[in-house]
């Protein structure tokens, strides 16, 4: 018996249900992961263009994290392909790592640096050590409501605040594609709205493509397209 197929659902901005116009920045073509008799990801096909915000939905164990890891290049497919800017997703390629920012697996924190220092350090590694870099980091910290916590260490903030800090480490760098696995973790509904606004603004203003695995209606609501797994 063949594997079930994932279903791509168009959003308000049009999606895979219709013909994709423009060059997709990420594309899955029959992407499948099996391990022996176990299916981690059923064959999945869709394409996301620059500036689009896509959600990946489906029940627990339906393959959302597996799909994100396939685009990250850390999970090998057993059939089909996942490509970023026309090239197979492969973590070993510097060009791939430059294109893709992610919060899929836990980001390690430095215990002895403040939140602001860590976000600024990541920004400086991409944009150089300049006053404008610190300003950029500060603006993101402020947008995520962390300004008053910037001088604290990771062990001095709550789980939701740590999640916002992880998001700021992910979003402070340039990227063609951002992969997020349940960014709503530990966040109250006001913070989820804040994050949804920030992400969709970045998609529209900077042309970043987002692929976001989520169980959160507020994020699904703002999508341009959706991949339904399971
Ligand atoms: N290393 C592994 N070996 C065998 N099965 C695995 C492995 N990793 C994941 N799976 C299985 O693959 C399926 C997909 O897992 P995945 O983590 O992608 O699901 P998910 O949709 O992200 O789930 P959740 O909503 O619970 O986070 C699950 O049934 C899981 O048990």
Image (cartoon, rainbow, N blue to C red):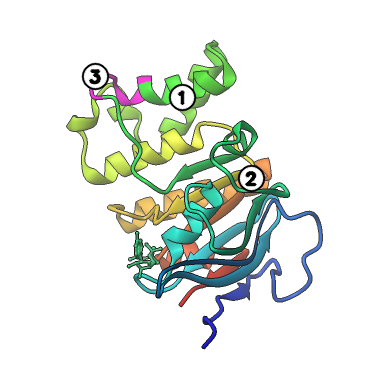
Residue nearest the observer in this picture, 115 or 126: 126
Residue 114 on the magenta segment: yes
* Callout 1 secondary element: helix
Q: Position of residue 194 (x, y in %)?
A: 43, 49
Residue sitting at x 43%, y 55%: 193
Q: Position of residue 108 (x, y in %)?
A: 32, 33
Residue nearest the observer in this picture, 83 or 124: 83
Q: Is residue 143 above or below residue 139?
A: below
Image quadrant in which you'd find residue 206: top right
Where residue 208 is drawn, which disc sits there? 2
The Cα atoms of the two marked residues, 1 and 2, are separated by 18 Å
Residue nearest the observer in this picture, 61 or 158: 61
Q: Position of residue 98 (x, y in %)?
A: 60, 33
Residue 99 in view of the camera? yes
Residue sitting at x 52%, y 81%: 3
Q: Position of residue 184 (x, y in %)?
A: 36, 55
Q: Is residue 13 above or below residue 211?
A: below
Point out the stretch of residues depicted in magenta: 111-117
Where residue 122 is drawn, which disc sits there? 1
Q: Residue furthest left?
A: 156
Residue sitting at x 34%, y 71%: 60
**Residue on which the image places disc 3:** 112
Residue 137 on the magenta segment: no
């Amino acid at each position: 018996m063949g594997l079930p197929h994932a279903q791509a659902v168009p959003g308000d901005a049009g999606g895979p249900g219709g013909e994709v116009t423009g060059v997709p920045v990420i594309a899955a073509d029959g992407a499948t992961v099996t391990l022996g008799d176990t299916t981690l990801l059923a064959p999945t096909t869709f394409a996301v263009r620059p500036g689009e915000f896509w959600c990946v939905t489906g029940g627990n164990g339906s393959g959302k994290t597996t799909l994100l890891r396939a685009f990250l290049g850390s999970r090998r497919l057993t059939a089909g392909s996942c490509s970023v800017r026309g090239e197979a997703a492969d973590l070993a390629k510097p060009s791939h790592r430059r294109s893709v920012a992610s919060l899929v697996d836990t980001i390690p924190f430095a215990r002895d640096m403040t939140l602001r220092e860590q976000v600024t350090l990541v920004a400086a590694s991409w944009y150089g050590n300049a006053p404008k870099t610190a300003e950029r980091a500060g603006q993101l910290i402020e947008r995520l409501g962390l300004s008053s916590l910037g001088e604290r260490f990771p062990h001095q903030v709550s789980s939701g605040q740590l999640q916002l800090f992880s998001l700021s480490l992910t979003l402070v760098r340039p990227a063609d594609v951002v992969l997020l696995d349940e960014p709503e973790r530990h966040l109250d509904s006001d913070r989820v709205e804040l994050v949804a606004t920030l992400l969709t603004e970045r998609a529209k203003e900077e042309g970043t493509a987002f692929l976001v695995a989520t169980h959160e209606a507020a994020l699904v609501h703002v999508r341009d397209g959706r991949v339904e797994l399971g």
